[in-house]
Image (spheres, helix red, strand yellow):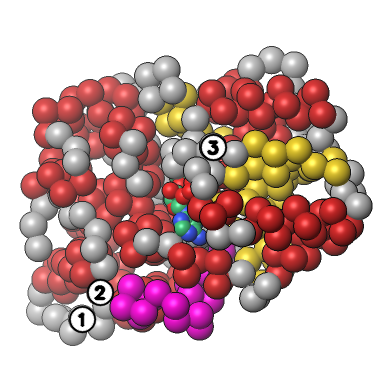
Amino acid sequence: MLNFNFYSPTEFVFGKGRAAEAGHFVKKYGGTKVLIHYGGGSAVKSGLIGTVKKSLDDAGVKYCELGGVKPNPRDTLVYKGIELCKKEGVDLILAVGGGSVIDSSKAIAVGVPYDGDFWDMYSGKPVEKALHVATVLTIAAAGSEGSGDSVITKEDGMLKRGTGSDLLRPRFSIMDPSLTQTLPAYQTACGATDIMAHVFERYFTNTTEVEITDRLCEAVLLTMVKETPRVIADPDNYEARANIMWAGTVAHTNLCGVGREQDWNSHGIEHELSGLYDVAHGAGLAVIMPAWMEFVYKHNVMRFCQMATRVFGCQMDFENPEATALAGIKAFRTFLHGIGMPINFDELGAKREDIPALVEKFGLGDGRTGGFVHLSSDDVAQIYNIAANAEI
Ligand code: NZQ
Ligand code: ZN
């Protein structure tokens, strides 16, 4: 196991009806003027924004609001948010929504105390200061409610880039699984795919002797394999929603990833797809992640056998371990297909002829990237090709 620091300061406030406590927690963390940031309407329609406002009123906390965050959140709204926060003297941003709303909130939080363009921090400059961010989560997916990461799309050129800092970990995150019951099945499945991908990015490692994090990863994956079909079949199943919601957080606070090298190439390769075609991140991952697995599995066949046998219940073929590894990857893709995810470019709405442009945007040039297998630009092109043509 490698040396590590694990810093996860977020207070998770979990359970039915807990959004009514937003005001209390804002005060607890020193917020006096809040920006309520939200998306395209679901949180207004469900009455959640009203609940949050009432809670802030009851606690005597002032607020202003900015809605309109789109999935794959854009820099253009971030600039508006920064301006608004400066004008209103906001000291805490309350994200009410999913990963897109939370990431947009984090970008605003970075931009307010910074003299230059917030995009600098999405182009490699470290985050040195940020306003406090807190969340009321409405979808189990990105894990941004517990992570220090934020991903924003620059509208000019649809360039999707991220930043990360412990300063961006939310002060508190209110997580009421019943809020996710209004999600369309497709969004639920996209979220589930993202959660599993966050685990796989950590599971496939060259670090040995990491039994505890291997087993934590497998616990999250097994939970997702069990609970996702249950909520797709029965969207109002609170208990299954609750298990998935907590799995999403455990998957991405880095609890499952400490002390081991991680990969993250599938995410990088996917971000070019959701950037270019404005498709859901989870749907892009459903197409890319199994393709990446097929491309790299020979690097450590036995680790893929471990996934196949422990997570997907495949029989170990001791005479032919490669067959077991491939059976595991096939089982993963079949699972994704079964929950309604696309499995190739046509189903996703991506185009084969764009592959050279996607590789170019990925921006690797002659370099290599990734913690499990160091990929070149040619390798990335091959992964896009496998993804383009995948079948069950
Ligand atoms: O905008 P509204 O109307 O709220 O609709 C949203 C949106 O259309 C809808 N939705 C959310 N909660 C709902 C609901 N509809 C009905 N009922 C509810 N309770 O769902 C749609 C998707 O929302 P979004 O926030 O985009 O989903 P998600 O949480 O998957 O976030 C995706 C973004 O997070 C980034 C992705 O790249 C993508 O931009 N990621 C962020 C990470 C992080 N910060 O740590 C890590 C991830 O790997 C990921 O890259
Ligand atoms: Zn993700």
**Any magenta on residue 233?**
yes
The answer to which of marks 2 and 3 sits earlier in the sequence is 3
Q: Do the residues under discs 1 and 3 have CB atoms within 8 angstroms?
A: no
Q: How far apart are marks 2 and 3 (CA)?
A: 41 Å
Q: Name the residue under label 1.
A: 314
Q: Which amino acid lies under the numbered mark 2 shown in the image of this protein?
A: Ala
Residue extending furthest toward the top: 116
| Mark 1 residue type | Cys
Please name whichever residue, 36 or 257, is drawn nearer the observer in this view of the structure. Answer: 36
Q: How far apart are marks 2 and 1 (CA)?
A: 5 Å
Residue located 23% across and 51% down the image: 287
Q: Where is residue 87 in the image (x, y as percent from the top left)?
A: 80, 23
Asked which secondary structure carries label 1, the reply is loop
Residue 304 percent location from the top left of the image? 27, 67
Query: How far apart are labels 1 and 3 at the CA level?
Result: 45 Å
Q: Which residue is found at the position 38% from the left and 25% from the top?
A: 158
Span shown in magenta: 230-254
Instruction: Judge by depth and name the residue closer to the eye, 112 or 88.
Output: 88
Q: Name the residue under label 2.
A: 308
Q: Categorize mark 1 by other alpha carbons within 10 Å: few (<14), some (14-19), many (20+).
A: some
Residue behind label 3 places its C-beta within 8 angstroms of ligand 1: no
Q: Residue at x 11, y 71 (%)?
A: 323
Comparing 180 with 275, the one in front is: 180
Asked whether residue 326 is in view, the answer is yes
Q: Is residue 296 left or right of residue 228?
A: left
**Which mark is nearer the camera, 1 or 3?**
3
Depth order, front residue of 281/357: 281
Q: Which quarter of the rendering shows the N terminus?
A: bottom right
Residue 58, by quadrant, is bottom right
